[in-house]
Amino acid sequence: MHTELADRFQTTDYGQEASQIVGKCVHCGFCNATCPTYQLLGDELDGPRGRIYLIKQVLEGRAATARTQLHLDRCLTCRNCETTCPSGVQYGRLIDIGRHLVEREVPRTTAERAVRTTLREGLTGPWFAPTLKLGQALRGLLPQPLRDSVPQPLRGGPRPQRHHDRRMLLMTGCVQPSLRPTIDAATARVFDAAQIEIIAAPAQCCGAIRQHLADPEGALREARANVDAWWPAIESGRCELLLSNASGCAAMVLEYGHLLRNEPRYAERAAQLSERTRDISQVLANCVPLLRQRLKPAAAQRIAFHPPCTLQNALKLAGTTESLLTGLGAQLVPFEDRHLCCGSAGTYSVLQPQLSKALRERKIERIERAQADAILSSNIGCIQHMQAATRLPVMHWIEWIDRRLA
């Protein structure tokens, strides 16, 4: 019965893609050297090579088990393994497909389904903001673990009122405007200093949460909705580019062309939207001389820059962002294991709290050992996750630049 299911899956677009990716793997094991969970657990099946082997077995007709599901669940989807793979295995795409296939075969407990449904619907739905406000109002009454995940309310501050010839559309995400409105406001002010006007895009989830929680259909729905909402401003010329100040969102939107490639109504627009999507560092990297003119003198500060996995492994822009920061006067301090995930990884900190906490503790220990005065990053999940474990200020690098504007 399972073999028949596997055969049917193999004929689907997902199945064919998975088989092609698996076929590239030469099982050399270089990937394990850069896998955070393999380093923590030392289990072959908790490394990329082992997980590929598990997915290959399922594709070939072997029944998936709860144990199979657990090893796939433990993957952070950080894609660090891709940086050392000599065969160019697109592991990030494969793990999403593998999870989707196993999810259809291995039933989860009622409690697991409830948590995952809450994350999928709660983080991406319109009730996240009011729920967060209620949590912030009652923060002092919450137990410590829950209190750590509820940030103090922040105010974004005034937005620029000037108009510029260059205009760009900024994704405003699903949780970031509520959790930390200072990021979008700072982005608007810094781009204004660079003589670029920021237009806020409709606040919708990019689809990454559903994609990584084995809900590809839901991710595609959100991708289609975003193409419909965002592409007209780019196509008409009203906005030059689609920007993201959350590297996780940018990484997801860059996949729209691939995800919607077989849908005639969306394929061309999705591909063009992906091509016109940029992380904000890519634009501001060309504006350093202009921004330097607007910066006020600042006291020397040792900065630890934590590049999110999506920034360094999916977008490959960690170096671009570092060069931008040093060009604007940041004194970046090196620290050990900088390339490893902090343990946030979207919903991972909720679903795998022990592993997530261990990775965070290692990250913070390395940074504090380097005697940093502050931590900069570029993803809301990383920022919130690390701030709960350190007294050092943790912020988006665009907020750091904003604070230095004269």
Image (cartoon, helix red, strand yellow):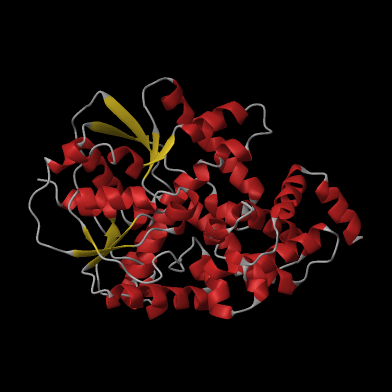
* Rendered position, 145 above or below 331: below
Left or right for 186, reference 93: left
* Rendered position, 283 above or below 46: above
State which quarter of the image contains the C terminus. top left
| Residue at figure coordinates x 82%, y 49% from the top left | 10
**x then y, percent, for residue 377:** 33, 58
Q: Identify the image quadrant of residue 132.
A: bottom left
Q: Is residue 264 visible?
A: yes
Q: Identify the image quadrant of residue 222.
A: top right
Q: Is residue 110 visible?
A: no
Left or right for 58, reference 99: right
Report the residue that reaches farthest toward the left: 297
| Residue at figure coordinates x 28%, y 40% from the top left | 284
Q: Identify the image quadrant of residue 140.
A: bottom left
* Rendered position, 363 above or below 231: below
**x then y, percent, for residue 205:** 49, 47
State which quarter of the image contains the N terminus. bottom right
Q: Nearer the viewer, residue 334 or 11?
A: 334
| Total marks in image | 0
| Residue at figure coordinates x 36%, y 27% from the top left | 239
Report the residue that reaches farthest toward the top: 236
Q: Nearer the viewer, residue 270 or 316?
A: 316
Q: Nearer the viewer, residue 43 or 268?
A: 43
| Residue at figure coordinates x 84%, y 59% from the top left | 60
**x then y, percent, for residue 183:** 29, 51
**x then y, percent, for residue 393:** 24, 67
